[in-house]
Amino acid sequence: MTLDINLHFSRGAFRLEAQLSLPAGITALFGPSGSGKSSLLAAIAGLARARGRIALDGEEMQHLPAHRRGIGLVFQDARLFPHLDVRANLLYARRRARQPRQLEEVARFFDIEGLLDRAVTNLSGGEKSRVALARALIAAPRLLLLDEPFAALDGIRRSAFIATLLEAQRAFGFSMLVVTHDIAEACALAGHVVALKQGRVVASGAFAQTARTPEFQALLDPRDVGAALPPAALVSGHAAGPAALWLRADQVLVAAARPSALSARNILESRVRAIVTEAGGSRLVELDSPAGPILSRLTPEAVDALALAPGGTAWAVFKAHAI
Amino acid sequence: MLTPAEMEILATSFVVAAKALLVLPLAIAAAFALSRPRLPGRLALDGFVHLPMILPPVLVGFLLLMLLGRQGPLGGVLHLAFTQNGAALATAVMIFPLLVRSIRLSFEATDPRLLDAAAMLGAGPWDRFLTVALPLALPGIVAGAVTAFAAAMGEFGAVITFAANIPGVTQTLPLAIYAVLQQPGGEAQAMRLAALSLALALSGLAVAEGFQYWARRRLSR
């Protein structure tokens, strides 16, 4: 799957312009609220008007209505049909699909076989999300769009649903574009990222590299500044393999000598690449670790006491539960 | 118990009201169109639909006569004036705004984003209307139809003007009450008919309320 987009539209004073080419796999559409992420998603889906061109695998579809694009969309609020039970919701999608998947197979995968005869108003938040995802996937869409799919879920259910989504992507092999404003979610899911700000694409590319760029870091809340690390190099509490883990600069300790007798499981000998002074006076220490670049936010006093300087050696320390 | 004459009046009322309800599909279409926020000419349609509610019923009957009476532009084609179908037509015109208002409310109460969800599952506009919008609005449609049926049994001004007061043909309950009141000593008969009319209207309302209660529970199990 490749998706080529060259779209522009206005909603009142807001104007969005996006020129993108997305590869197969998972792409995160990332940006602060009001950046136009959901509007862009609606335009790709065909639910909102936009000028320009959308081509999926070379097939132009800007002139097609939403129901003829073969694109699936999972909404933030599951939007299950309240007058139909779970099975009828799944069948609604299956009957209208060109090459549908087997209902039993999809239901088994999402562990919703026991819910099939339930009314949708009788499901928990996590169950609703799984049914909504199953309903979208049963139609075997060429591209699956997800609009803040985790926003309605609390912490544990959220990570469970991220794991489910990753497993489903591996099992069924579809491409997806996920709208999120949560950096940890984007990092866990996506191999590719598109960053939007005020209706413009400010950064786009492979996640780990793009996340390091100043344009991307500028979009982040100061508390979210950090770096993406490959899970294989770390001790983490994650069972199902996320694409990468987002390590916030606030959660990394720096030691001038190798620490011992410490509970933290991740102690990485690194080289100090740079020390940047932030707007508030704090220092952002950029470390080159064997797992990749790591950021740590320190006070000026700590930097002086440890005598940290570019080119020197330091140990980055963080808890498994910090990621 | 009811006399044969009263049975005939009751039967006429039922038949006229039932025929008038044939306007339901048109009311559903108008209500759905009016529930779309971006419909062009929505205000004009809204005003037109509500005309029979604002105009004096006698005037509605008179306008129908002008249009469909023997001298009217459509009178040569459709012979409806002073017939039972004519009584049903006048009744239909009068209950139309009532139907549209209640059906429109239930279309507006259903989440329009469910229609987007249906589109993303491959459902075209007609498909979405028939499989999502209509079933979700059904409780409101049935309740509106029952209320409108009860109101149809009581329609007076437009019916008597356009279809006259012909026993066994166009003489519905309110027209019969009017007729007996014209005769000296008809009060007792009028009272019986009035009680009958009241009982019918109340049971219609009760059925509508009961159905809505049941449907609401069904949709929020």
Image (cartoon, coloured by chain):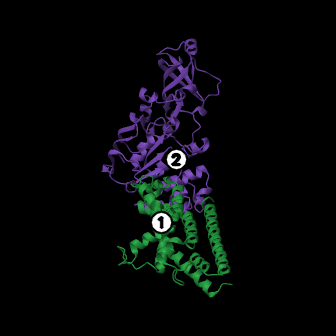
Chain colours: A purple, B green
Callout count: 2
Q: Which mark is residue A256?
A: none
Where residue B195 appears, x then y in whole percent? Answer: 67, 75
Q: Residue at 54% of width from left, 44% of height from top?
A: A150
Mark in front: 1 vs 2:
1
How many residues crowd around disc 2 within 10 Å: few (fewer than 14), some, or many (20 or more)? some
Location of the C terminus of chain B (image quadrant) = bottom right
Task: Name the secondary structure under disc 1.
Answer: helix
**Camera-nearest residue between A175 and A201:** A201
Q: Is residue B30 above or below residue A258?
A: below
The amino acid on which the numbered mark 2 sits, given as a three-letter code, is Gln
Q: Badge 1 is on which residue?
A: B27
The amino acid on which the numbered mark 1 sits, given as a three-letter code, is Ala
Where residue B156 appears, x then y in whole percent? Answer: 54, 72
Where residue B98 appears, x then y in whole percent? Answer: 53, 64
Q: Are marks 1 and 2 in contact (CB under 8 Å)?
A: no
Where residue B24 appears, x then y in whole percent? Answer: 49, 69
Q: Residue at 47% of width from left, 65% of height from top?
A: B27
Q: Badge 2 is on which residue?
A: A76
Location of the N terminus of chain B (image quadrant) = bottom right
Q: The residue marked by circle 2 belongs to what chain? A: A
